[in-house]
Amino acid sequence: MPLHLIPPTRRRFLQAALVGGTAWFASRYSVAAESKASDEWWALLSDPHIAADPKESARGITMLDCLNRIVDEILAEPSPPEGVIINGDCAYSRGQAEDYATLSTALRRLADAGLPIHMTMGNHDDRKPFYDTFASQRADNALVDGKHVSILSTPTTNLFLMDSLLEVNVVTGELGQPQLDWLGSALDAHSEKPAIVFAHHNLQFELKEPQTIIGGLKDSQQLVDLLSARPHVQAYVFGHTHHWNVSEMQEELHLVNLPACSYVFNPAHPNGWVRAKFGPDQLALELRALDRSHPQHGEQHELQYALAVDAR
């Protein structure tokens, strides 16, 4: 049975937003009057790489064990998150139906606790078997044909979840011109609040020798040009590299590389998840490493926005 991950309760509802004469399916949250935006937080995850076999391991790590520990930690927080975002590579290798079936067993505890879960596509995902398992993740009217895209609205921030899957099990990603065109129009239509863009792949630009792009987002320059032209866009959040890192581009755009939930490529890097608070003038992040003895566990970043956005 498909797992429905966006519950209708806990002060939330889904509505179709009509923008510029086009029906956009967006996840919109109705927040109770007594709720304070400053107290709200989100759980940000990436690269769980769940396989059909619950005992499957890679690089000495059993992936499902890691995700189950993260679920335990999220549920043990003093207050629940407003939502959970898993930023791609939900499946281990080729995004098979059995992978997503196993993933659903771990995520069901979050859904049963009333937590909305939103996922993006990574290079190890496959949209059809993903939708077959997670039926509620498919919008009635796709925002971009053939892509898994959504907008989440918080009291202070608009989140744009993009689809950088180019081809299943091919490391390089791409947004593509239709999705870039949609993103530009969507950002322009939602400029009343700071915007943060999510996609699985890291930015990577053409190398001089040789002229090629390896591993990252194929159309990185087009994306950067699009985001830089819109000052209300404050951050680009991605995964893919399995390396927790926070940096800045052109002193205007924050880059947040989420840690992998599962294995890392460099044993010195932490795996885990990130506790995020979206404020009106900053993005506050805290790393929750699965290894509590890791020197970066609990590392905090307060990313100040370059431009205040006036509400209309």
Image (cartoon, rainbow, N blue to C red):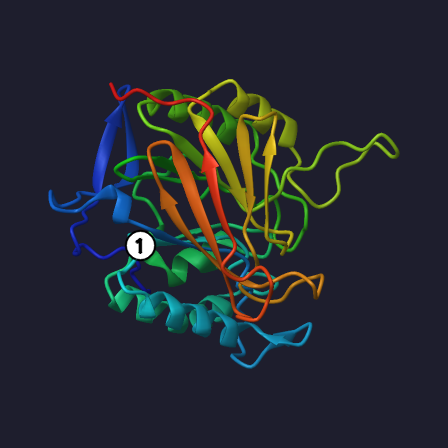
User: In the rendering, at what x and y percent does residue 187 appear?
Assistant: 40, 25
Observer-nearest of 163 and 299:
299
Is residue 43 visible to the viewer in this orientation of the structure? yes
Q: Is residue 212 left or right of residue 7?
A: right
Q: Quadrant of residue 38?
A: top left
Quadrant in which residue 55 is drawn:
bottom right
Q: Name the side, left or right, on which 269 lies relative to 310.
A: right
* Residue at the extreme bottom: 55
Badge count: 1
Who's the residue at 59% across and 53% down the image? Answer: 244
For disc 1, the neighbor class at 10 Å (few under 14, some 14 to 19, many from 20) is some
Q: Position of residue 185 (x, y in %)?
A: 41, 22
Going by the image, does 60 lie left or right of 246? right
Say which amino acid is labelled 1.
Answer: Ser
Circle 1 residue: 136
Q: Position of residue 31 (x, y in %)?
A: 17, 44
